[in-house]
Image: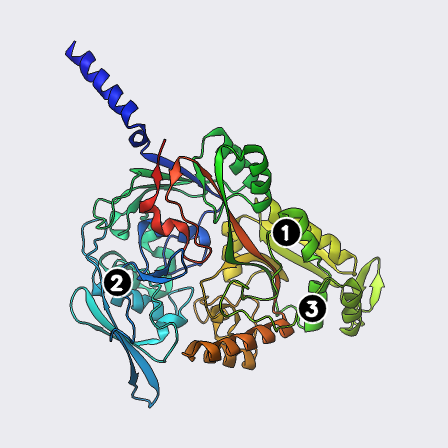
Amino acid sequence: MTCRLVLLVLALVALVNPARAKDELVVGMTQTPTTWNPLISAMLAKSLINNMTARPMTAWNADWQLVCLVCMELPSIENGKARVVDLADGKKGMEIDVEMRDMRWGDGTPVTSRDVAFTLEVGRHPLAGVTASESFKRIIKFDAKDDRRFTMTIDRVTFDYNSLGLTLLPAHIEKPIFDSNPAEYRNKTAFDTNSTNPGLYFGPYRVVEVVPGSRVVLERNPTWTGEKPYFRRILVRIIENTAALEANFLSGNVDYVLGELGLSLDQVLAFEKRHRDKYDFIYKPALIYEHIDTMLDNKLLDDRRVRQAILMAIDRRAISEKLFEGKQPIADGPISPLDPMFSPGARRYPYDPAQARKLLDEAGFAEIRNGVRHSAKGERLALEITTTAGNRVRELVAQVIQSQLRQVGIELRIKAEPPRVFSEGLSRRQFSALAMYAWVQRPEGVPRSILHSKEIPSADNGWSGQNYPGYRNAEMDAALDAAEREIDPAKRRALFADIQRIHADDLPVLPLFFRVDPFVMPKQLKGVVPTGHLNGSTLWVEQWRWEN
């Protein structure tokens, strides 16, 4: 009788508070990272999961305001925690004081200034393979005051001096690996060789299982010192085919699909028409730049008239209206109209196949044989576009572009690769002609890493940088450098206008659209707030709740 009474009480408790009965959330997304190391590779898939297991020093929130996550107070000139100083070479630099929160790695080791110093050491090393090493090289001095307070000296004055998007490495685990052979660090990091080591994580969750290409399992981190997350366990399922992902969502095998890296916009638009009563829908305009990189080492593409012709032969407006119901605005360059630094004055390229044909004639591809243009030297204007496999809408866009380029005499072959393979090839500049993908950017971000000549990845710099086309223009370099250093917003906006003008003239990258993030959420899932920029919604995962 007593046992029956206990079971009855437990059942009543579950009925009274059914929301607490769901302590596991199954999340779906379309890509698997090439590495889990926060400094290596720039895949969105990695960022979305790393957000749940760590925190950057600062981040942009959903209101597009810069906030502290690891630091106690955002350093500023106004509060005295940032100062312009004279450097030994006679130039101006900045000193920035930071105090960190009381945080601990998953094995109980405190997060300290030693971890910051080690992270900077890795970031500055020329052979470490860090994606954006330039930002690390600017830090010319690091002075640890104690375990949680330090001062950094930067070699220049910049407007975004307190945007410290630094995600830390655990020195007590990673430093011995790095010190043994820096050139091999990217291949031997414990983030990939021992991914379930709790000492790698200090966020609300830690990784307890990784099955590449299939799933990542996260559990509450017992050493997390912030708000306790609602879900005991989060299972991230990797389903690279978006149609299969939708089927799993509808069947209940997946509770929620990440809006930043899940169902395509056309899927969600159709999905809403069928299921609008069962789910909540948010279409978040975002700083996501869908574009086509051009390999400028390819002789067929080194004349900018050819690149301009390609863009004018693509009917981007028709693609947007047919596939996205006009929700994805056409991009004219890397800076979104949503960004305060956007300039409407740069050259725009309308759909104009007649002008595209004229430009191709002028570029020396006037002879047409069997529908394909040839140069006077007999070079066939045949290109390959590489993109990610499994993304239905992206593959469809590639097919439309293939058909439209054929109308002006350009032969286009489509090569779809698994996202992991595509990302690895991109980072080593291994695409032959065109590469279609997206950048996720932050508000007022200077596009230095994708346009500056010093950001071209190579074996000599450990494949650091994200200027995959290999674009070189001294005027662009000067505008990028000046924009970073300009404190006055009005003057900086003029420099951003120069960046957009030069880009539009040269077209090292062919702009397609600024994407909208489509969020489809079960009505029981609360607390997910789309941000529309680089710091995605998973960075606040501890606020997610399930309410029946």
Which residue has dot 1 on it?
A: 326
Compared with 417, 502 (above or below) is below
Compared with 331, 328 (above or below) is above
Q: Mark 2: which secondary structure?
A: loop
Which label lies toward us, 1 or 3?
Answer: 1
Between 446 and 452, the residue placed more toward the observer is 446
Q: Image check: 453 left or right of 381? A: left
x then y, percent, for residue 77: 29, 76
Between 207 and 225, the residue placed more toward the observer is 225
Between 275 and 408, the residue placed more toward the observer is 275
Disc on the earlier residue, 1 or 3 = 3
Q: Image check: 366 left or right of 227? A: right
Which label lies toward us, 1 or 2?
Answer: 1
Which residue has dot 2 on it?
A: 71
Q: Mark 1: which secondary structure?
A: loop
How crowded pointer 3 is (Cα within 10 Å; few <14, some 14-19, many 20+) is rated as: many
Q: Image check: 12 left or right of 382? A: left
Tell me the amino acid under the disc marked 3.
Gln
Disc on the earlier residue, 1 or 2 = 2
x then y, percent, for residue 521: 45, 39
x then y, percent, for residue 278: 49, 32
* Label 1 – label 2 distance at C-alpha: 41 Å
Compared with 211, 409 (above or below) is below
* Residue 214 appears in the figure: no
Quarter occupied by residue 171? bottom left
Q: Mark 3: which secondary structure?
A: helix
